Amino acid sequence: MTTRIVVIGGDAAGMSAAHQAVRSAASHGRSVAVTVLEATVHTSYSACGLPYWISGEVGTQDELVARTPDQHRAMGLDLRTGAEVVRVDTTARTVRYRSAGSEQSLDYDELVIATGARPVTPEWARADGALKPGLGVVKTLDDGSFWLDQLGAGSLRRVVIAGGGYVGIEMAEAALARGHQVTLVARSRLLSMLEPALSAQLADTLKAAGVEVVLGSAVDGVEHDAQGRLIAVCAGANRIDADHLVVALGATPATEFLTGSGIPLSARGALRPDPSGRVIPGVWAGGDCCEVRHRLTDSWSFLPLGTHANKMGRAIGENLGGGELTFPGALGTAITRFAAPGGYLEAAATGLNLAQAVSAGFDAIEVVTQGTTASGYHPDAVPITISLIGDRRTGRLVGGQIVGGRGAAKRIDVVAMALWTELTALDLAWADLAYAPPFATAWEIVSLASRRLAERLG
Amino acid sequence: MTTRIVVIGGDAAGMSAAHQAVRSAASHGRSVAVTVLEATVHTSYSACGLPYWISGEVGTQDELVARTPDQHRAMGLDLRTGAEVVRVDTTARTVRYRSAGSEQSLDYDELVIATGARPVTPEWARADGALKPGLGVVKTLDDGSFWLDQLGAGSLRRVVIAGGGYVGIEMAEAALARGHQVTLVARSRLLSMLEPALSAQLADTLKAAGVEVVLGSAVDGVEHDAQGRLIAVCAGANRIDADHLVVALGATPATEFLTGSGIPLSARGALRPDPSGRVIPGVWAGGDCCEVRHRLTDSWSFLPLGTHANKMGRAIGENLGGGELTFPGALGTAITRFAAPGGYLEAAATGLNLAQAVSAGFDAIEVVTQGTTASGYHPDAVPITISLIGDRRTGRLVGGQIVGGRGAAKRIDVVAMALWTELTALDLAWADLAYAPPFATAWEIVSLASRRLAERLG
């Protein structure tokens, strides 16, 4: 008997699930028929890469596409693009989708929901169901094309960015690289999961590079002239002249089509799969339309990121084919950088910041350590600042953040590994990390930061 | 009652022990009097930094000195330089040392041996108790001065390097940076703990940069002309014209003065302290004169490295002052790079290589994974090769190695953390590591390498 698998969504989680289901079934002597329904005409592209395409660092759209629809089809999948699912019936086990103007139905034995997340667009940004002129988000390849058209050539433009998260900072970099005048407006601080002192270093770097940074203020309106051209962006008392507004205010699960399906959704509309990827019998979900278990708080967190999507999809596919694989949750590890001729700073975080740790019930303290990425006398040495959060009751690390120059931020992985394995600060301080003058100080800065935290934890 | 502590050796382990003993005693309400005996006139310098001083990347000797004798004295230590210990009497608890031509005695309650390691110099390299003309090692600041004189200015010289370890490779870089003609001769392959394929990448990089690399051949003699000037280096059938020979054939514990003291030494002459740092009652030891416990094999290993020395010294000092701190052993984590206009490669290793794992009794396999350090489309992406070694019986990782371009090798710390916490390859594959296009692929290369190993381990 062949298991009919329908996957909704043809990006990281969906395609990982589809291909892994085929591989897993083959290795477990089972038979599966996989159909993938993708609303757009694109599959398996890197949304994270869009800012680097817009900036000109990536030459063509094709480079952002890991696999085209035709490549997926050549690997044996029944992939239908331009197929937008409008309804799921979990009793009859059918999905209804719109394609080329008409609606069709498809029966399934197992359904995989991998529709991702869509950018948040506030009421003031929309008119007639679309973004107002001059406004845009950064999510799809079409969004990338749009911004490349707007910013890629021609005269100096005034670009305002609403949002101080990853996308906002990366788009500030891209617009600056294209020679425009850039203002970034953020409700609180830049990368709000960073501690204030580290976030301030990031803001200083953007300012040094020529970005106007407006913090503690949320964009709440736009003004257009009589010809319908954007002329200004409003944020509280601020009125900022603008030709373009990048709306980078976060993402929300793309699950509207599930309303009324009986499939349970969280308050923010996210699916909550168990570690195997299953939501209810016959229905699985992975990727940015889901919340994931946070390993430190054992609570549900919305962490839309390609790396989780790939892993969740792989686990679902393996399980659908008869294997056994679980997604073990996440720590919220994240990294980005701001790079411009006038300033360069990397930033990364993992686990909880101080406020999150306190609110999760830890007896938390923070220790900030300054140092260098290489021995002080070596020309590759650049400053690095590490904030580590520990729990006084257990001595355990519960979070960490890094900002610094080239080579600083990827050290966050060492902190992530310590969190993953529930180490104490003292354990991490004494771990055998790599040292040589071009790469570290003799007390590796992560070890030193952890040693200082351990001393404070007592 | 004041505890009289005598520390022999004024570098990383010794000075860490001395200062930490003072701090620890103060915080535990004890009284200590610390005397440090250092044979040279230098303290707390970075031997690892010497090649970068010789190459010109570090401007002055002073930059390599973390603390001068006067700075240590200003912090309250009785530091005696030019004081060479000649005998230890553990029954009478006295040390005898030579200083300014005469011998003196010093009583101790607790003795810390931190004399480090000295470079191995074979019989053929020596005459009348010294190295023959044209030959030198790379260990002390005076060695650095010597090489700076020889290579730092003037005409093109033919420099031969005996030894394919860290020092050999770093000195090849330094001599090349000074514009000389460089030949490196190594008994087996470069960095012999690397798997052959990874070591070959390193050899190719040196060759591409203009270094002549002679592998599988050991230097076994030198030729001088009638004026006593070095003219050639012999290695088996090879005779290489040479003006200079860098002897970089490893190090050996500097413990000759302990012969007859009754303090137990290993076959290679190393001290073997317990985790607290104690060798026998009243005698402690740390740093490069010691072997350390290897956490994977639970055997004694000689891993002379400043990072272990700092930690061992700190533990000894803390324990001498009434605290409690243990050195938890090592994994053999190590890193270096070769950098020249014609080639750049980073190399790192941790844990066991395949041969070591097999000989330690693991049912070991190796999986080599190629990838990039950033998303393939991002301009910062450079190649990276990861070799992971796993044990089929337990699924555990037992070792890893990395070679690659800028930003590749420090990822070894993630593998080291997995070894430190005894993770399986599958555990590491699913850990939440940082991803963004300038820093990693969506399946982080370490995660991908570990996933592939896990699949092979079954």
Image: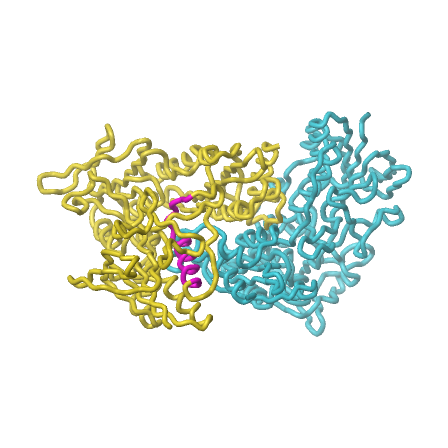
Chain colours: A yellow, B cyan
Residue B425: horizontal and vertical position, in percent? 55, 59
Principal secondary structure, stretch drawn in magenta: helix
Residue B17 coordinates in the image, percent (x, y): 72, 37
Q: Position of residue A265 (x, y in %)?
A: 33, 47
Quadrant of the rendered image containing residue B400 = bottom right
Which corner quadrant holds the C terminus of chain A? top right
Taking the spot 77% from the left edge, 38% from the top edge, the residue there is: B7
Q: Residue furthest left?
A: A226
Determine the residue located farthest toward the front in the rendered image: A91
Question: In the rendered view of the protein, which quadrant contains the N terminus of chain A?
Answer: bottom left
User: Left or right: B417 with respect to A18?
Assistant: right
| Tally of numbered discs | 0
Res A63 visible: no
Q: Is residue B345 above or below residue A292?
A: below
- The answer to if B363 sits in the magenta stretch is no
Pick the front one: A54 or A64: A64
Q: Nearer the viewer, residue B420 or B146?
A: B420
Residue at the spot x=33%, y=72% of the render? A74
Q: Nearer the viewer, residue A51 or A372?
A: A51
Whether residue B334 is visible to the viewer of this picture, yes or no, is yes
**What residue is drawn where x is 80% and y is 49%?**
B255
Between B388 and B12, the one nearer to me in the picture: B388
Residue found at the far right of this picture = B92
Magenta region: A300-319
Left or right, A122 with reference to B280? left
Q: Horizontally, is A334 left or right of A362 in the view?
A: left
* Vertical comparison of A334 with B250: above or below: above
User: Horizontal and vertical percent for residue B158?
Assistant: 63, 62
Q: Is residue A316 magenta?
A: yes
Compared across the picture, whether A336 is left or right of B152 comes to left
